[in-house]
Amino acid sequence: MSPATEKTSTAAGWYTIGQMRAWEKNPKKHPDSNVADIARSVRRFGFVAPVVVWGSRGQIVAGHGRYLAAQMILRADPGAYLATDAPGPALIPVRVVEFASDAEASAYALADNRLTEANPMEPLDVAAILKEIQDAGGDVEVPGWTEAEIAAMISPADPADVAWKEFDERIGDDAPKGKQMKCPHCGEVFNA
């Protein structure tokens, strides 16, 4: 932690939608389907991870998807409790930080997004965990995967069926020219 932010962050607080605003330069886009998945997660598990807000500016630095999901939930139910421990309705947990500069806030926002996407989950491990949840009688409908993807992971006809792993476009960079590849999201087959 830099000395500029070390003594100016609070562990947690509660903000309403109106007390914060999105970072207009946020490079991470959240299509409606992604926001709906995050909203389903919030409805099921509660608002677990706080939004990081630059306190003096009220600017969101990390957590834009959760912010958009909260807006979606509150449009449908303005009095919703978004977190089980919220002191009142329509409150979002936040971590308030005073960044030293726009550059520091921007760098943190980029790092926060990049570090999560740079470490994809292992499909076979996810499949094993989903199977454990199912065997324990739990609800395996986890936001972020379709019912068909979950069914294929829990009861694959072939271990290759559990190949939903996030597609890294750089994979093809070092592939021999002409190597046939398949997109794990849409199934399109193409040559590198």
Image: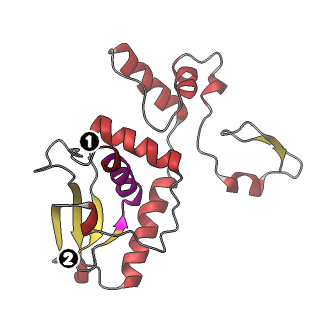
Identify the residue position indicated by label 1 in the image: 46
Q: Establish if 17 lies above or below 34.
A: below
For the residue pair 163 and 22, the one nearer the viewer reads as: 22
Disc 1 crowd, CA 10 A, few/some/many (<14, 14-19, 20+): some
Residue 58 badge: none
Q: Are marks 1 and 2 in contact (CB under 8 Å)?
A: no
Which residue is outermost to the left?
87
Distance in Å between CA atoms under marks 1 and 2: 29 Å
Q: Using residue 172 as the reference point, say whether residue 1 is left or right of it.
A: left
* Mark 2: amino acid: Glu
Residue at horizontal 65 percent and vertical 19 percent from the top: 158
Residue 6 badge: 2
Examine the image and state in which quarter residue 96 appears.
bottom left
For the residue pair 146 and 165, the one nearer the viewer reads as: 146
Examine the image and state in which quarter residue 39 appears.
top left
Q: Which residues are magenta?
A: 61-73
Residue 180 at least partly seen = no
Residue 148 at least partly seen = yes
